Amino acid sequence: MSNAVNPLNPRLTIGVCPDQWGVWFPEDEKQIPWEKALDEMQEAGFSIMETGPYGYFPKDPAKLKKVMDDHGFKVVAGTGWGILHQADAWPETVKTFRAIAETHAAVGAEYIVHLPPLFRSDKTWEFTDERVLSPDAWKLYIENANNLGQMLLDEYGLKMVLHPHGDSHIETPEDIARIFEATDPKYVNLCLDTGHIVYGGGDPIAIAKQYPERIAYVHIKAFDPDLVKEAHEKDWPFGEAVARGASVTPPAGEPDMAELVKALSSLDKDLYVICEQDLYPADPSFPLPNAIATREYLASVGLGTL
């Protein structure tokens, strides 16, 4: 049996992505090279891959398929950043996601994760956008979320999931509810990123139970609630919160992983559950043993097997 599927929860499939190795950007001198990360992901016992920032792994479909096949990985998703709320940025967003879709459809992926643009830079921590969208900008955000999801599904057969994120316009439970109320569930659903939902003041277990039909994909990770509280009280940028250790290795932090796995299983739907931990910048010696410990702990609570 694959270590990706636990017989007690056969509809939940565990996977991994570069974030677990401290990778936030396609290229960055502080990140582990993709060849080393891929070797270590295989060594850690994973077999399901979300490819992370587009351009970190090879963009050429033939090369991407070969390196993933050589390491025993099935690619199930790609990710991309794209501005939805600015009309002048929309053509570039479409161009970016077409490139991502062409590569990932060619290697058999099923999902594209839309990472929202942040209003503070992950690198400089400076403000890059308005913290709160105007009504017109929000309206455009919704329209273009539907448009992007429709393009990806109708033209490439890929399902788009929006990703809540610290320092973005989809962060709090109220933001998520607002998205669900306004978007078309045929084209727009949620990547339940459990860590970012905790960071945004929400309960991912409650959200999974409240919106079972909109949960299409999962990033499973934990955040330290005390550091999250301090981050918001002192208005740290998200990148600073991560640098101070807010993203933690389960079973530390929230949510309660055993309860989360139960809640996801109770949805009774096929879900990829991708291990993540925000570690940028990471000590190169840390991700491999940390990922092994994470995978083994999650197996102990019913997600994946040893």
Image (tube, rainbow, N blue to C red):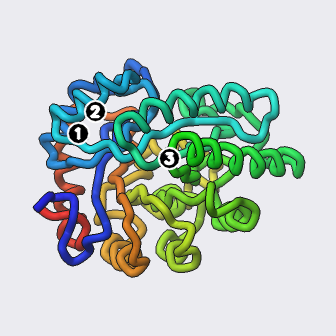
Whether residue 227 is visible to the viewer of this picture, yes or no, is no
Q: Report the amino acid beneath label 3.
A: Leu
Q: Report the amino acid beneath label 2.
A: Asp
Residue farthest toward the top in the current orientation of the protein = 29
Circle 1: is it few (<14), some (14-19), or many (20+) Cα within 10 Å? few
Drawn side of residue 114 relative to residue 271, left or right = right
Task: Tell me the element at label 1.
Answer: loop
Q: Residue at x 23, y 27 (%)?
A: 66
Q: Please report whichever mark, 2 or 3, sits nearer to the chain's N-terminal start.
A: 3
- Front-most of residues 178 and 142: 142
Residue farthest toward the front in the current orientation of the protein = 155
Q: Residue at x 16, y 40 (%)?
A: 72
Q: Position of residue 74 (x, y in %)?
A: 26, 44
Asked whether the residues under the numbered discs 1 and 2 touch, taking CB atoms below 8 Å apart as contact, a structural biologist would say yes
Q: Which residue is mark 2?
A: 283
Q: Which residue is mark 3?
A: 158
Q: Which residue is mark 1?
A: 286
In the figure, 274 relative to 10: above or below? above
Q: Quadrant of residue 44?
A: top left
